[in-house]
Amino acid sequence: MRRLVLGLLAILASILWVAPAASSPPTIPLTISGYIVDQHREPVAEATVRLFLNGQPQEIKIGEKQAEATRSLSDGSYHLSLPLAQAEVEAIQRGESRLEIEVLKPTYVTLRQTVPAASLAAGSDGLYASLDFTLAHIRNAAFWIATIVLIATYVLISTEKLHRTVVALLGAAFLLFVTYTLGTFNQDFFILSFAKAIHYIDFNVIFLLMALMIMVTITARTGVLQWLAVRAYALAGGNEWTMAVLFVVAAAVLSAFLPNVTVVILMVPVTVEIAFILKINPLPLLLPEVFAANLGGTATLIGDPPNLLVGSFANFTFVDFLINMAPAVVLTMVALIALMWLFYGRQFRRVPAEEAAALLAELKERHQIADPALLRKCLLVGGAVIVLFIVQGFFQMEVSIPALIGMAVLLAWTRSDIVKELEAVEWPSLIFFIMLFIVVGAVEEVGLIQALADWVNALAGGSLVVAILLVLWVSAFASMLVDNIPFTLTMLPVVAFLTATVPGAQGKILYWALAFGACLGGNGTIVAASANIVAVGLAERVGYPITFNEFLKKGLPVTIATLLIATVWLLGMAMLR
Amino acid sequence: MEKVAYKNIVCATRGGEASRATEDKAIAIARQSGARLAFLYVVDTSFAVEQATSEVELAAATDLHHIGELILERAQQRAAATVEAATALREGAVSEEIEGYVTEHPEVDLLVVGHLSDELRRHLGPFLARLADGGQHVLEVKPHPE
């Protein structure tokens, strides 16, 4: 036994002794890094990167671990390391050995490039080389599946065959399901990974929407919107035309800060009530009010969902919107009031003083501030949030943060029941946004958006003016027919490409064109904006049904006039820059 | 249809120009038959369900309730010269509430409605057919020409 132990010790000692002598010659670490981008110079993340020496795959070092491949990061960068013997390094430098890097990713053409011997640079602790890749998309099964899903999403949302949230949910779930079933066996079916899907969701938009929904609900509870409508009537002093103008101005200003639909739902019934008591047709008051709500929403970052999407994507601040959008919106309001006079001017009259006073007394009694203490809190918090929106750029704070803090403070201050308040969140809308981000992310991932961007770029022919006109007017007319939220989401990466490539567009003017187009198009048809659908529903319930054509007769001229103003405004901006 | 002697007529109205002809017809038949007449208005905020929170929808319902009262008051005033009319205001889906009202008032022998939209016809159609089978009459009135 003792001999056995001694024998084992001897073997172990000999191994330990011999091992250093038998170890491989000293190696030189070679580090290769670079960026992988697509043809639009956008980073390509999650690409698999492999190293080959003389055609043979090499194990690379990632930190302390050995691996067959590495993956590019979200900024498109990759980094790998390989220990090479001195002789191998010399062979590479003499051009006798070939060092190659292969980059592959589903939906892109696989690329293998030789690391040029001349690019090897000696550093203090090894050799370094840099090699960048530009990948081209391929139109494989993933491309067509994602494209069909996007088109189906648009069609189903527009035709209202299914609830839009269900449509978006089906689309996103289907894309991920295909990726992780068929895509597992055949890379041609790999559309987008789960991690990438999550990456495409803009939580800045989601958090902002959620916070605004809760703050608006608490504020609406005070009855302030209806009270404002009554104040507008009181200010008019019985003059119907002045009253109509004040109503549209109030609707526009409120819609700049509150959802257009909420403004319409709360203001229009008061308007109808006034019209009923005055025995006048409510439509000359109601329709301009809806148009004004859509225009007012165009003025600010939080006014309309397309603005939220554009602002978050292009990193615009609240103040950016006030400078670049709001003045033009004021001009569009002047145009709206002029058109209102043209359409209905003759129908307005002066209400006899006694009748006006009696109506005002009745309205005041019915529409009082329900909870003045709550209103004070809402105004203070709302004011603070707006101040934070204004200084948000200075602090480089995402726009959702002021809204989140405002929501949190208001909930705490009013000692609200959080479970009850959370019921106020329109979860279907938020889920719609989340799923839509994934669907549009998928078509970006497979290269459809890039193809679309190339096509628009070719149409623009490098002209900023043509690009502005194209983005503005196409967005507006598209928004008249399809939901402007998926449309804006689809267009954002296209506009990003145009901004990078069209000479003079680097000031991000095309984003403003997109915001104007998507919002102003909302006045064109009944289906172009939720506020229109609500107003038409409301009018129908009180015996004033509005047909598609009747709405179009008033809405289209308003849309064209406001688009012309936006065109002049944008071209002026382009010239001044 | 006017020649049938009705005893209880209910007229579903939504007010405005669109319902003027419907109200006029119901008033005329009630006068000719010497029937009791009731105007029914339904506060339906389903148009806001998809678009707003329940509280905002409730606020809209409160305002629409008042508008409904105004509409019924107007209809009553229009009838007052010839017949005495009662009013009823309900909240919910239009088709369900019309059905509910008529079911709760089996004495109603004529239901007068305005031109039914495709959607309303889809929902109300089977009930109207059952009414006709049961001997109660339904009159759909087309709006006055512009």
Image (tube, coloured by chain):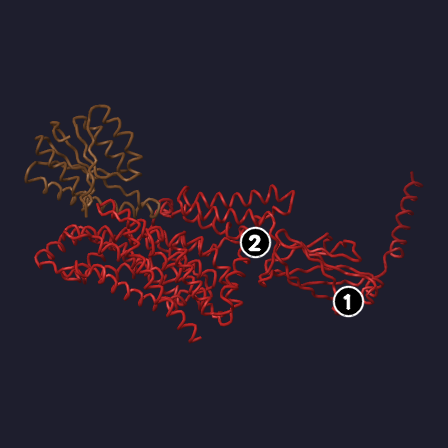
Query: Which quarter of the rendered picture does the N terminus of chain A lie within?
Result: top right
Q: Position of residue A324 (x, y in %)?
A: 39, 68
Q: Say what amino acid the circle numbered 1 marks.
A: Ala
Q: Residues within 10 Å of mark 1 (few under 14, many from 20)?
A: some
Q: Please give left or right for residue A436 compared with residue A532 in the image.
A: right
Could you tell me residue A492's position as x and y percent?
A: 48, 59
The brown-coloured chain is labelled: B
Q: Is residue A360 left or right of residue A214?
A: left
Residue where numbered disc 2 is placed: A445
Q: Colour of chain A?
A: red
- The kind of residue tagged 2 is Glu
Residue for point 92% across, 44% down: A6
Residue A117 numbered tag: 1
- Say above or below: A72 vs B132: below
Q: What is the C-alpha distance between the residues marked 2 and 1? A: 34 Å
* Chain of residue at mark 2: A
Mark found first going from the N terminus, 2 or 1: 1
B26 w.r.t. B55: above or below: above
What chain letter is assigned to the residue under label 1?
A
